[in-house]
Image (spheres, helix red, strand yellow):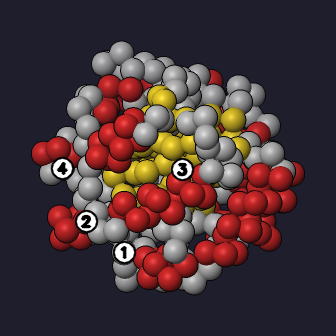
Amino acid sequence: MEDGHGRRFYYLRLSVTDVCNFRCDYCLPDGYQASPKQPDLSVAEATTVMHAFAQLGTRKVRLTGGEPSLRKDLPQLIQAAKTTPGIRRVAVTSNGYKLPSAIDTWHHAGLDQLNISIDSLDPSEFAHITGHDCLPKILTGIDRALELGVQTKVNAVLLSDGARDRLQQFLAWLKTTPVTLRFIELMQTGDNRDYFASNHLRGVEIEQLLIETGWQLLPRAIDAGPAREYVHPDYAGRIGLITPYSKDFCSSCNRLRISAQGKLHLCLFSDAGIDLRHAIRDGDANALAESVRAMIDNKEVSHYLQQGNTGGTENLSIIGG
């Protein structure tokens, strides 16, 4: 599956809900606001989507949200992804709120990779950012994931105020903790324009500090996400950077998105999703694959974030970032 700009797509981000129980400052500061919408994709419908994308060359499926652990049938969704022919890696992105009680079940269902969002290792600051005082519980869940052999990454949104202090806390943690910490540049959405203007920090500033202190860039796998990952011989963990405002960021795009309501998003910041729910409900993965293939040439060369475009993305819980 290749678009008109020569990019190939090995990676599907499948949102299973847009509901989230956190109130992060940069995404849902007032909490999730329910609105009339179609029901979320069922396990059967999600299975049809994954089979269609696997036919098109997808190797990796990430189940995301909102907060996917709010779905009681998340283990069934993980298992459906794991048993789809052609899918080699199954990942979940979560805020970790239910992690200690859920990780064994997810692992048994076939989870290969886990991404947990932690913007600060200071418990009080974490509670301030998210609205939940639960950082120790989440860290316990990460420890258990590592015991089970689940490849674990931690996502941290870069915020300008206090960024260097948070970096030092994370570096101390990575000395002995074998996770990949990924710093993600704050992205402007329809709902956070003022917050973005006050808090955006370019990832290149952190990247330069890493290079100056001996961190080395790793090659990127074809089904990997957009992070540039660095390693250091003195650290058990790795550090990645996702810098959507950098030059040519979109040239390496290898992923497509399906929303929890069955809309194809060719870009995180496209104006609107393409409604495929009728085709998904038919349960015909072959026909759905052909529909998706026909739409790929409409993918834009860039997200145009540098020009202030936010498209139809009001907040990142809508489609999972």
At a point 23% along the width and 32% down the height, the residue shown is: 247
User: Dot 3, crowdedness within 10 Å: few (<14), some or many (≥20)?
Assistant: many
Tag 2 and tag 1, C-beta contact below 8 Å = no
Which class describes the residues within 10 Å of circle 4: few (<14), some (14-19), or many (20+)?
Answer: some
Q: Position of residue 62 (x, y in %)?
A: 60, 45
Left or right of residue 297: residue 305? left
Q: Indicate the amino acid at tag 3.
A: Leu
- The residue labelled by disc 3 is 181
Label 1 Cα neighbours within 10 Å, binned few <14 / some 14-19 / many ≥20: some
Q: Position of residue 238 (x, y in %)?
A: 57, 42
Q: Residue at x 48, y 42 (%)?
A: 240
Q: Earlier in the sequence, mark 2 or mark 1?
A: 1
Q: Which residue is mark 1?
A: 25
Asked if residue 51 is positioned above or below residue 16 in the image, the reply reads above
Q: Which residue is mark 2?
A: 199
> Which amino acid type corresponds to the residue marked 2 in the rendered image?
Asn
Earlier in the chain: of badge 2 and badge 3, it is 3
Q: Which residue is mark 4?
A: 309
Labels 3 & 4 near each other (Cβ < 8 A): no
Q: Secondary structure at mark 2?
A: helix
Decide which of tag 2 and tag 4 comes sooner along the chain: 2
Question: Tag 4 or tag 1, which sits nearer the N-term?
Answer: 1
Type of amino acid under label 1: Asp
Q: Percent x, y for residue 75? A: 77, 57
2 or 4: mark nearer the eye: 2
Dot in front, 3 or 4: 3
